[in-house]
Image (spheres, rainbow, N blue to C red):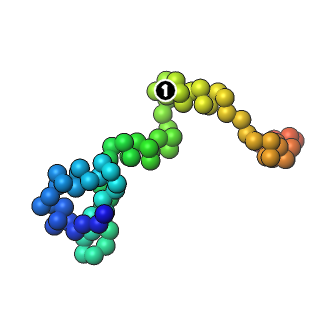
Amino acid sequence: MRVTSTEFQQNVGRFQDAAQRAPVAITKNGRTHTILLSAAMFEVLVKGRVARPVEELDDETLKAIAESAVPSQHDELDQMLQDWTP
């Protein structure tokens, strides 16, 4: 959904509700100026991209990290680094 900044100012609540379903692009002078999105969508976008202390990670994330592995199709990368020293 795209709305002008004037429309947004006149109907803030309506567009806040709409942003719970999909991002709302707010335009200024015909160009996208701001994107309004739900807090849940914002969390999805930034989760994992922001450095956090390990103590703040939830159990599901810690389990996923502990169980993660590099697929065998990338074994050659390990071989390339075997003799590498920093």
| Residue 5, x across and y down, in percent | 20, 66
Residue at 19% across / 61% down in the picture? 8
Amino acid on which the number 1 mark rests in the picture = Asp
Residue indicated by mark 1: 58
Name the quarter where the C terminus is drawn: top right
| Residue 64, x across and y down, in percent | 60, 31
Name the quarter where the N terminus is drawn: bottom left
When the figure is inspected, residue 76 is found, relative to residue 3, above or below; the finding is above
| Residue 74, x across and y down, in percent | 79, 46
* Residue 13 at least partly seen: yes
Q: How crowded is mark 1: few (under 14 residues within 10 Å), some or many (20 or more)?
A: few
Quarter of the image where one finds residue 34: bottom left
Task: Identify the residue at the far left of this view.
Answer: 10
Is residue 56 found left or right of 78 in the rendered image?
left
| Residue 12, x across and y down, in percent | 17, 55
Residue at 47% across / 41% down in the picture? 47
Q: Which is nearer the eye, 75 or 12?
A: 12
When the figure is inspected, residue 84 is found, relative to residue 4, above or below; the finding is above
Disc 1 on helix, strand or loop?
A: loop
Is residue 58 found left or right of 37 in the rendered image?
right
When the figure is inspected, residue 70 is found, relative to residue 63, above or below; the finding is below
Is residue 58 found left or right of 15 in the rendered image?
right
Residue at 23% across / 51% down in the picture? 16
Question: How many numbered discs sit on the rendered protein?
Answer: 1
Residue at 14% across / 58% down in the picture? 11
* Residue 50 at least partly seen: no
Task: Identify the residue at the far bottom of this view.
Answer: 30
